[in-house]
Each structure stands twice: as C-alpha cells, then as structure tokens.
Image (spheres, rainbow, N blue to C red):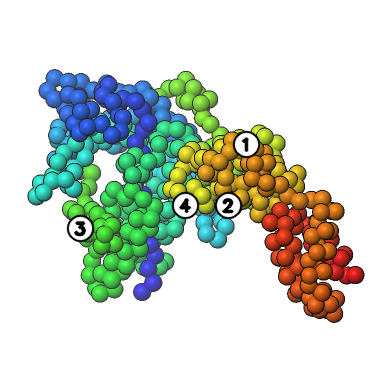
Amino acid sequence: MEWETVIGLEIHAQLATKSKIFSAASTAFGAEPNTQACAIDLGMPGVLPVLNQDAVRMAVMFGLAIEAEIGEKSVFARKNYFYPDLPKGYQISQFELPVVGKGHVEIDLEDGKTKRIGVTRAHLEEDAGKSLHEDFQGASGIDLNRAGTPLLEIVSEPDLRSAAEAIAYAKKIHSLVRYLEICDGNMQEGSFRMDVNVSLRPKGQDKFGTRAEIKNLNSFRFMDKAIAYEVERQADILESGGKVIQETRLYDTVKGETRSMRGKEEANDYRYFPDPDLLPLIVDAELKAQVREQLPELPDEKRERFVLHLGLSRYDAGVLTSSRELADYYEVMLAEGVDAKLSANWVMGDLAAFLNKDALEITQSPVSAQQLAQLVARISDNTLSGTLAKKVFEHLWNRDGETVDAIIESKGLKQISDSGALEQIIDAIMAANPQQVEQFRAGKDKLMGFFVGQAMKASKGQANPAQLNELLKKKLAG
C-alpha cells in the first residue's frame, strides 16, 4: 500500500508583552520559580481578569500579515481540564469565535515551486505553568511563572504532505512572528512551540486517516525526526491490519521515538463555555487601520525587492530575508554603497560559517555590518584579494583591529597590484625553474598552476591573482 502523509500544525507563539494576558504580572524569563504568578494567574477567589491590549494588537497584526479574516467580535472561553501546572482547573482561551480567522502563507518547496498553506485560525489564550522533572528525585516541581503568559495559537489546515513541508511552514511562521516583533521565537525558552498532527491515508483517498498529535516540539530538527518516526509507526500498524488510535504523544529526544501520553480529547471533553468575567472582544475598523500602519515590510515583500532591485537570485534573497535581523544587517552594509552580490556572498559565506562555528546569532556578531562593508569595499577596489580578505576577516572576528584599513596596514596584507613588482617576482621564479619553463613552452599547460603557486608563495599570498595570471601568460609565452 502506498500511503500519503497528512500533517497539520498547531503553533504556540508566546507574545512579547511585558505583562501577562489578564494580569499585570511580569512575563520576564528566568526569574526564580513562582515569583511571577499573581492571584489572577492562579485563579484565586474574588479576582477578575483584565485583557492586555498589547496582546490584542499583536494578534491583529499577525492576522493582517497573513491576509486573514479579523473577527469583529471574538469571545474568550474557559477550557476545563486538570493538570498539575494549571491550578485553577481551566485555561482561558478562544473557541468558536477567535480573533483571527482564515488566512494563508506561502512556502517554498524543495523543487523551487511555492505552495499555499491555509491557516484555519489564530486565537489568544493564556499559557499554563511548567512541570519540572529534572531536579526532583521521584517527584515533580511546579513553576507557575509562565501561567498567564499570552499565547497566540496558530492552527494550520491539514495541507502539509511531508516533514519538509511542515518544517518550511513552521520556519515561515517563526520568521514572520519575529519580523512583526510579536514573539522572540526563542525555542529553547519555550517561546515558540509546535504540536504536530500526523495521519496517513491510502494514496488517492480523500478521507483523512486517524491522527496522532505530537506535543511540545521545540526544534525543527526534532520535528523532522518525530514526523519520520510517526509516519513509519502508523504505516507499520496499518499494514499489519491494525488501527491507529487517536491520541496525544510525546517525542523522546533520547530514544528518537514518540510515545503515548494520553487519549486525544475532543472539544466537548473540555466543556468550553464563555468566560463570565470577560466581555466579548471587539476589533473595530479604527484599530485594524492603526495596526496596519504599524506593519513592517514583510519577509516575502523584502525578498521580492532584493530580487527585483538588487538583482539577487531568489535563493540568495530567501536566505538573507529568513530573519529580520539578518536582513537588517545586510541592508546596513548596502547603505555603505558596496556591491550587493559580493556583500550577499560574504554574509551567507564566511560570516555565516563563523557564526555557526561559535554558535552565535547575527545580533552577536563580533564583525559589524559597517566593518564587513569596509572589507567588501577593499575587495572591490583591488586593495584585497579574496584570500587576503579572509585573513582580514579573521582579524576582525578576533577583534584585532577596529577598522579594515588599520588591519591591512598593521598586518601588511595589502594586495600587490604593481606590475613592476609582480614582473620581478615572475622573472625570479622563471630563472629558478628553467626546466619547467621549457616544458611549459613545449605544450605542458598544466604547469601554469605550478608557476602561479610559486608566485603566490613568493608574494606571501598578496599578488593580485588576475594580474599575476595575465603577466605569467605573457612572460611564459616568451
């Protein structure tokens, strides 16, 4: 049997508000356990929730960015369930009337094509606390600092057909919420978490199979592995005549497998009902207009501009606009008047390699955009060859100098472009290697590499490569 994979994602983006969604308690990460949970977050008797206006603005901003329907009237509901890190026994969420309705995003496929992925809804809700298992032998600790932190839950249509498509979609949403500055996207801190619904159906069948939901994935790599395992698990069950059970599963990163957590609840299991303490949320035309004015240039728009106005390939433009911080870095370089393509090559090449090696974000780069622009300028005006530029870059990375020109001067790394000086080097090499000169002139063209190597060695790598090759050809031709 040939199976088709069907995937839908529920992404929880923690909104970057300073206070919680229904209280004035701080959302700052890293505080001592249970020091940032107030009576409202814990649902103590007699307290009343008050909606955070910034959370609403951020939700509307996301909705406008994905061209979604914005609900004029949305309702908060109580989602009832018991969990140790949910002391009040219910979570305030949205159910039938969410603030953001149907929208879509475009993802790039591996074959170069694009695919539109539907977004069913995006609704506001409060986060639960966090259970801690590592530091307690035979017990779990509960940290309620996270309780009440505003979340935007973004639910996709089941339009994804592979792990690669799911990752492309998740990365697109991750990039978008960071561009909008409504979520910091820090997956290690739990600011951006993914639940993946996976099911299989026979190829060509319209009816969906029974799905399993894999909860709380906090890396794209783990999501890839979890989907691969789950697809294989479900295929084995179906091909052996069994039935897939609808359930919630967790991905064990150590064993590389998913394992059952609990039976999957349906909406009626949560006994949703409108929260009696919160009025319906009204988003009028004036608020939508205000938020629309605040929208930044979005990733797809920026990429198209880079392609049309800078002449970059779609791939290069896609890499450079993958995060707002990276795009900003690149545009600061361009403001210095340097070549767009050469700058792109350095950002995506040496800079990216050094950042990756030292596990740094672009915002932590020891080499500023202005410094890298100076380096690119010195390549363009032939002060530096590509090889010498790499040496200068290493000095910049190690903070061995404040400016490119100062490093070139102090380290003696200026490219030799003087024809007279290059001719002296070539004459000395030819005089020291008469046999190779004779063989070259007899037709052994491969010896050109030998002479270039000797000349670069003699010049300590500082000879202008293009000039050197041209002069060598003339001299060796006799």
Please say whether residue 2 is visible from this viewpoint. Answer: yes
Callout 3 amino acid: Ser
Q: Is residue 114 left or right of residue 227?
A: right
**Dot 3: few (<14), some (14–19), or many (≥20) neighbours within 10 Å?**
some
Q: Position of residue 356 (x, y in %)?
A: 47, 50
Q: Earlier in the sequence, mark 1 or mark 4?
A: 4
Q: Which residue in the protein does label 3 denote?
A: 260
The answer to whether marks 1 and 4 mark residues whose Cβ atoms lie closer than 8 Å is: no
Q: Which residue in the protein does label 2 denote?
A: 349
Callout 1 amino acid: Thr
Q: Which residue in the protein does label 4 denote?
A: 357
Q: Is residue 423 left or right of residue 413?
A: right
Q: Position of residue 150 (x, y in %)?
A: 31, 32
Taking the spot 16% from the left edge, 27% from the top edge, the residue there is: 43
Which type of secondary structure does the marked residue at label 1 adopt? loop
Q: Position of residue 335 (x, y in %)?
A: 66, 34
Depth check: give the residue in front, 38 or 275: 38
**Dot 1: few (<14), some (14–19), or many (≥20) neighbours within 10 Å?**
some
In the rendered view of the protein, which quadrant contains the N terminus?
bottom left
Depth check: give the residue in front, 110 or 71: 110
Q: Which residue in the protein does label 1 denote?
A: 403
Q: Earlier in the sequence, mark 1 or mark 2?
A: 2
Q: Position of residue 184 (x, y in %)?
A: 40, 36
